[in-house]
Amino acid sequence: MPLPLSPSRRCTFPWSSTTIRRPVEMTEDCLRLKGLRVTALCGALAEERVRAQPFELDVDIGADLAPSGGSDDLGDTIDYGEVCAAVCAAAEGEQFTLMEAMAQRVAEVCLNADQRAQWVTVEVRKLRPPVPQQLSTSGVRITRHRQ
C-alpha cells in the first residue's frame, strides 16, 4: 500500500528547480549528535551515586530535513545547539540508577525540544565502568517515537 505523499516543496536555491516529494509517514532524515560528553550521577553502586562519572552520548533525531535543505535557513530545522544544552541539563542535573533511565530521559527531552522530531535514538556509554575486567565502555541504546 503506497504511503500518502506530502505536499511538494520547491527548493529555494536559485539554481535549483527540483520539487521534492516524500511519503508523509517516512522520516529517514535525521540530525546526528555524536560524542556529547557529560559528567553525571548514574550507577547502581553507592560510590556511583555520590561521585559524578564521565558518559558519552550519541543522539539521532528523526525529522524531515527537506525544508531546511531547500531553504538553507536555521529556522527550518532543529537547532542542535539547543538540543545539546537541553540534553546536558537533563543528564547532569538529575540522578539515575540505570543508564536505561538516563537514555529514556534524554529521549524525552529530545522529543519535547522540537515538534518536528518524530523519533529519537539515544546511546549512552559509561566511559569508566566499575568492573574488574578490561572493558572500555558499557552502554545502552534505545529508540523512542513520538506518540
Image (tube, rainbow, N blue to C red):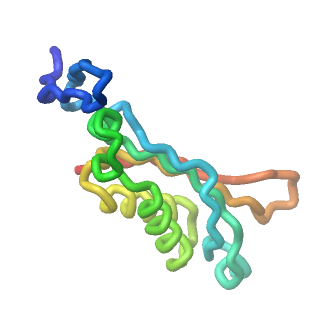
Taking depth in this image into account, of 47 and 64 the one nearest to the observer is 64
In depth, the one of 137 and 14 nearer the eye is 14
Quadrant that contains the N terminus? top left
User: Residue 80 in the image: x percent, y percent?
Assistant: 45, 55
Q: Along the horizontal axis of the image, is 57 left or right of 5? A: right
Which residue lies at the image location 16% right of the left edge and 16% below the top edge?
2
Residue occupying image coordinates x 51% and y 64%: 102
Would residue 54 appear left or right of 2 to someone viewing this image? right
Q: Position of residue 62 (x, y in %)?
A: 37, 41
Q: Position of residue 25 (x, y in %)?
A: 22, 31
In this view, 15 is above or below 53: above
The single residue placed furthest to the top in the displayed view is 1
Q: What residue appears at the point 25 percent right and 28 percent down from the top-left corner?
A: 11
Q: Is residue 137 left or right of residue 108?
A: right
Q: Is residue 70 above or below residue 112?
A: above
Seen at 53% across and 49% down, the residue is 33
Q: Position of residue 63 (x, y in %)?
A: 32, 41
Q: Determine if residue 19 is in view.
A: yes
